[in-house]
Image (cartoon, rainbow, N blue to C red):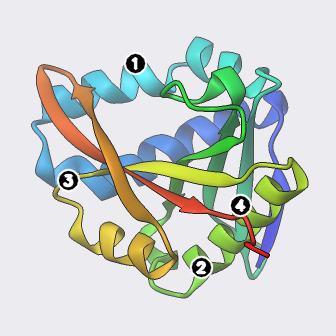
């Protein structure tokens, strides 16, 4: 597996990958209208350009056997989707193409995220996960995350609940 940080030149590839992986993950659980509304809002050129050029957000492409397998987005400080203390880092997006799921890449990507958090002197990493995405919740628990709150997630005219989960990275002495 190889991980490479994205830049604005990767916009079109990131946009296509984001739409493909999000649709594969959540398309069957939402109406076509709500899904399309979300895809247009979250992954339009202006929105992704803004996120790619935000110094507190970083996107990474994940490659397996030289093939683009998925991507990761990490946020710190005011780029986080919820107000959090400065010592928190958000894992906002982790998506893989269907063919690359269940190959152990998620564990490696979360290990990478933890290393980035430590390099940035962050004590906690956190994420939001849809309340009905039980496989993801189970995976995050296995990775050491615990639920600490929740927030609303809007997809078109559907108001959904995401559980917020975090992992403390501080090593107690």
Q: Residues within 10 Å of mark 2 (few under 14, many from 20)?
A: some
Helix, strand or loop status at disc 4: helix
Closer to viewer: mark 3 or mark 1: 3
Helix, strand or loop status at disc 2: helix
**Residue placed under numbered mark 3 in the picture:** 131
Q: Could you tell me how far apart the alpha carbons at marks 1 and 4 are, in whole angstroms? A: 26 Å
In depth, the one of 18 and 91 nearer the eye is 91
> Could you tell which of marks 4 and 3 lies nearer the N-terminus?
4
Q: Could you tell me how far apart the alpha carbons at marks 2 and 4 are, in whole angstroms? A: 10 Å
On the rendered image, what quadrant is the C terminus found in?
bottom right
Location of residue 88 in the rendering, given as x and y in whole percent from the top left corner: 65, 42
**For residue 55, above or below residue 120:** above
Q: Could you tell me how far apart the alpha carbons at marks 3 and 2 are, in whole angstroms? A: 21 Å
Q: Give the left or right position of residue 103, taking residue 69 as reference.
A: left
Q: Residues within 10 Å of mark 3 (few under 14, many from 20)?
A: some
> Could you tell which of marks 2 and 4 lies nearer the N-terminus?
2
> Could you tell which of marks 3 and 2 lies nearer the N-terminus?
2
In depth, the one of 90 and 85 nearer the eye is 85
Q: Could you tell me how far apart the alpha carbons at marks 3 and 1 are, in whole angstroms? A: 22 Å
**Residue placed under numbered mark 1 in the picture:** 41
Q: Residue at x 24, y 30 (%)?
A: 152
Q: Residue at x 57, y 35 (%)?
A: 15
Dot 1 and dot 4 residues touching (CB under 8 Å): no
Dot 1 and dot 2 residues touching (CB under 8 Å): no
**Residue placed under numbered mark 2 in the picture:** 107
Helix, strand or loop status at disc 3: loop
Q: Give the left or right position of residue 48, taking residue 22 as reference.
A: right
> Could you tell which of marks 3 and 1 lies nearer the N-terminus?
1
Q: Give the left or right position of residue 62, taking residue 115 as reference.
A: left
């Amino acid at each position: 597996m190889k991980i490479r940080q994205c830049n604005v030149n990767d916009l079109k590839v990131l946009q296509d990958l984001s739409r493909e992986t999000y649709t594969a993950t959540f398309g069957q659980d939402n109406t076509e209208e709500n899904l399309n509304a979300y895809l247009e809002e979250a992954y339009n050129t202006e929105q992704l350009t803004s996120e790619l050029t935000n110094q507190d957000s970083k996107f990474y492409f994940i490659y397996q056997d030289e093939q683009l397998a998925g991507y990761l987005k990490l946020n710190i400080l005011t780029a986080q989707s919820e107000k959090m203390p400065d010592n928190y880092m958000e894992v906002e997006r982790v998506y893989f193409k269907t063919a690359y799921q269940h190959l152990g890449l998620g564990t490696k990507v979360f290990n990478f995220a933890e290393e980035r958090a430590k390099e940035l002197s962050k004590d906690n990493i956190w994420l939001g996960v849809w309340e009905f995405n039980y496989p993801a919740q189970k995976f995050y628990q296995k990775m050491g995350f615990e639920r600490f709150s929740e927030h609303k997630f809007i997809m078109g005219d559907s108001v959904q609940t995401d559980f917020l989960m975090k992992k403390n990275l501080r090593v107690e002495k």
